[in-house]
């Protein structure tokens, strides 16, 4: 029996509501109080879940409406898309979010989910056409089309998707939030904390948009240059990770103003976080470079088959 999209969304909404209602009491900015069960320390902010559910519904609804697709979305792409949404959900709603207020290392895992893994998987799901087909017609006609057709918006899009600027934004957002003053401020302040999450997610989506080339979008960056950009990004990522890992003093004292759920020494916590940023970040760039080369090969192969 075919499952209708609103049944799926209703089920996910019920699950999210139950998790929020059963979550332990947390600090105003999402921390964990002494004695809380870490497995029940889900974020009590419902907005990320609601946004993700709406996006999931629109995607599924778009697939349902899409008859005779010119570039069908296969099961692998669907799996990537929903896995990407799951990564964002885990980063913002699961115990990862409140734990990130106490441990620098877990905060870096959260940033990897928001900035690299989640956006990458979402765009590997080729969401553009399903989302455009899935949104209500009134929104498409009255909001999306006028926005896309606006001259200033088109100029802004052309500028912001310049590969050099996109790469600067991607790596710049990482460096900016690792500056101790700004990082500590984000941990202590709700508004800055949410802005940090938004900037990480936005910069990730923007960068992977020009690298992944989700159909029917065509990046203006040649496949070879995409591989080069990914290789070059390893350098600043490695540098920042090494600075944090080999620092002789703790850089982020805001974490130690709250109870520590794990018996990790501050320096060890910082070193694990630096290594996560360094090693996992570099591995992601190398992995995506390999995926891009596969796309490049398939593209060249398809061009050779054209008579």
Image: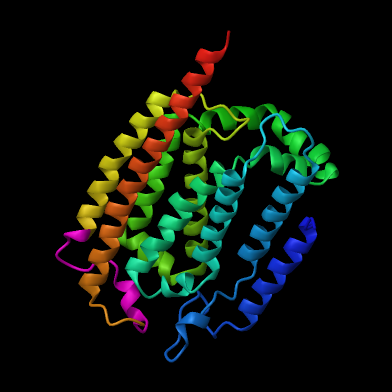
Residue 85 part of the magenta-drawn span: no
Instruction: State the residue lying farthest toward the right.
Output: 138
Q: Is residue 251 left or right of residue 162?
A: left
Q: Number of labelled discs?
A: 0
Outermost top residue: 307
Main SS of the magenta part reads loop
Residue located farthest toward the front when viewing the structure as drawn = 1
Q: Residue at x 61, y 84 (%)?
A: 22
**Residue 198 position in % (x across, y down):** 52, 55
Q: Residue furthest left?
A: 248
150 to the left or right of 242: right
Check the image and report above or below for 57 versus 77: below
Q: Position of residue 258 (x, y in %)?
A: 37, 81
**Picture quadrant of residue 10:** bottom right
Q: Nearer the viewer, residue 184 or 211?
A: 211
Q: Vertically, is 261 above or below 165?
A: below
Highlighted magenta segment, given as a residue range: 245-260
| Side of 155 relative to 113 (left or right) | right
Quadrant placement of the N terminus? bottom right
Toward the viewer: 247 or 226? 226
Residue 169 x, y percent position in the rendering: 43, 41
Instruction: Tell me which residue sits at (14%, 65%) in the image.
Output: 248
Question: Residue at (57%, 82%) from the top-left corner?
Answer: 23
Task: Please tell me whether residue 273 is drawn above or below residue 257 in the rendered image.
Answer: above
Color style of the picture: rainbow
Instruction: Where is residue 104? Give x, y as percent.
Output: 33, 68
Name which residue lies at 51% across and 40% down. 206
Query: Which quarter of the image is occupied by the C terminus?
Result: top right
């Amino acid at each position: 029996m075919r499952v209708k999209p609103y049944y799926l969304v209703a089920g996910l909404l019920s699950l999210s509501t139950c998790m929020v209602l059963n979550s332990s009491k947390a600090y105003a900015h999402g921390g964990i109080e002494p004695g809380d069960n870490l497995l029940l320390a889900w974020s009590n902010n419902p907005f990320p879940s609601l946004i993700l559910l709406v996006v999931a519904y629109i995607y599924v609804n778009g697939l349902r409406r899409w008859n005779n697709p010119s570039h069908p979305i296969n099961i692998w792409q669907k799996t990537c898309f929903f896995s990407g949404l799951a990564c964002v959900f885990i980063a913002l709603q699961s115990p990862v979010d409140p734990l990130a207020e106490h441990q620098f290392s877990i905060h870096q895992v959260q940033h990897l989910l928001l900035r690299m893994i989640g956006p990458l998987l979402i765009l590997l799901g080729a969401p553009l056409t399903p989302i455009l087909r899935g949104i209500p017609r009134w929104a498409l006609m009255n909001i999306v089309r006028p926005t896309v057709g606006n001259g200033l918006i088109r100029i802004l899009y052309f500028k912001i998707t310049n590969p050099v600027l996109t790469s600067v934004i991607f790596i710049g957002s990482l460096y900016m939030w690792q500056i101790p003053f700004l990082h500590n401020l984000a941990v202590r302040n709700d508004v800055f904390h949410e802005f940090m999450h938004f900037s990480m997610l936005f910069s990730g989506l923007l960068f992977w948009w020009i690298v992944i080339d989700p159909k029917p979008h065509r990046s203006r960056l040649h496949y070879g240059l995409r591989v080069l950009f990914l290789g070059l990004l390893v350098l600043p990522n490695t540098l920042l990770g090494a600075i944090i890992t080999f620092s002789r003093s703790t850089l982020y004292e805001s974490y130690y103003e709250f109870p520590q759920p794990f018996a990790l020494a501050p320096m060890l916590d910082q070193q694990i976080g630096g290594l996560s940023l360094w090693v996992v970040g570099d591995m992601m760039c190398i992995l995506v470079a390999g995926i891009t080369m596969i796309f490049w090969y398939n593209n060249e192969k398809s061009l050779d088959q054209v008579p």
